Amino acid sequence: MIRFLIPFVAVVLFLLEPEFALFSPIQWGDDILYLVPRFLILYLIFISIYYSRKRACLYGLFFGLLYDVFYIDIIGLYSFLYPLVCFVAGSAIKFIHQHLSVTTILSLFLVAIMELVLYYFFSFINLTTIPLTSFLSNRLLPTIIANLLFLSMLGWAFKYLINARVIQHARDAS
């Protein structure tokens, strides 16, 4: 049963992202802040670190393609970025400790890099004209803070769920 729980959580997070995106933008004084929920890629990073880099890349390819088809008109952008981020996370964890706080920092760093790549791609094809300083202060920083709050609440649950699957997988193999 727990075998299907990991992909089920990924599907739920994929469907919840646009619901949480409805809370954005937020007026804060004179600034307008944009919060971009990146729940699914954070979960895929956790899968890549605590379970299987290969499986996370496959999930990333699948959900990245779904994201491209349903949410943006450029096919291939997220279906390339999601597996790449999962691959980098799974490769980087070989050199650092798998503690939850380290994983959280790595996840937020990778999401920030992904957001910067998306910004530069969209500015390269002239889909955005936001200056970099506005992007950093009004979108990237609030996005990182919002996703940090999300991981603070559910990061331990992700780790517990994935570790339970690893234990079950080891029990099934023996």
Image (tube, rainbow, N blue to C red):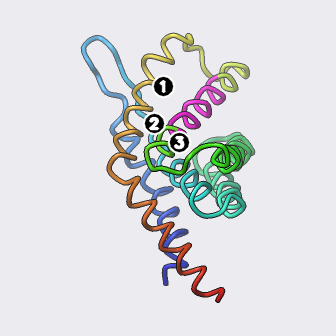
Give the CA distance from mark 3 to mark 1.
14 Å
- Give SS at disc 2: loop
The residue stretch that appears in magenta: 106-119
The disc placed on residue 36 is: 2
Task: Give the main secondary structure of the magenta stretch.
Answer: helix
- Give SS at disc 1: helix
- In the displayed structure, would residue 136 be above or below residue 149? above
- Pick whichever, 11 or 160, lies toward us: 160
Viewed as shown, does residue 107 lie left or right of 74? left
- Give SS at disc 3: helix
Viewed as shown, does residue 66 lie left or right of 76? left
Taking the image as drawn, is residue 68 in sight? no
Q: Which one is earlier in the sequence, the residue at label 3 or at label 1? A: 3
Q: Which one is earlier in the sequence, the residue at label 1 or at label 2? A: 2
Q: Which residue is mark 1?
A: 140
Q: Which residue is mark 3?
A: 107
Query: Mark 1, residues whose alpha carbon is within 10 Å: few (<14), some, or many (≥20)?
Result: many
**Residue 126 falls in image quadrant:** top right
- Image depth: mark 1 or mark 2 in front: 1
- In the displayed structure, would residue 147 be above or below residue 3? above
Give the CA distance from mark 3 to mark 2.
15 Å
- Image depth: mark 3 or mark 1 in front: 3
Q: Where residue 147 sits in the image (x, y, percent)?
A: 41, 40
Q: Where residue 45 sits in the image (x, y, percent)?
A: 57, 50
- In the displayed structure, would residue 17 be above or below residue 135? below
- Pick whichever, 15 or 94, lies toward us: 94
Give the CA distance from mark 1 to mark 2.
8 Å
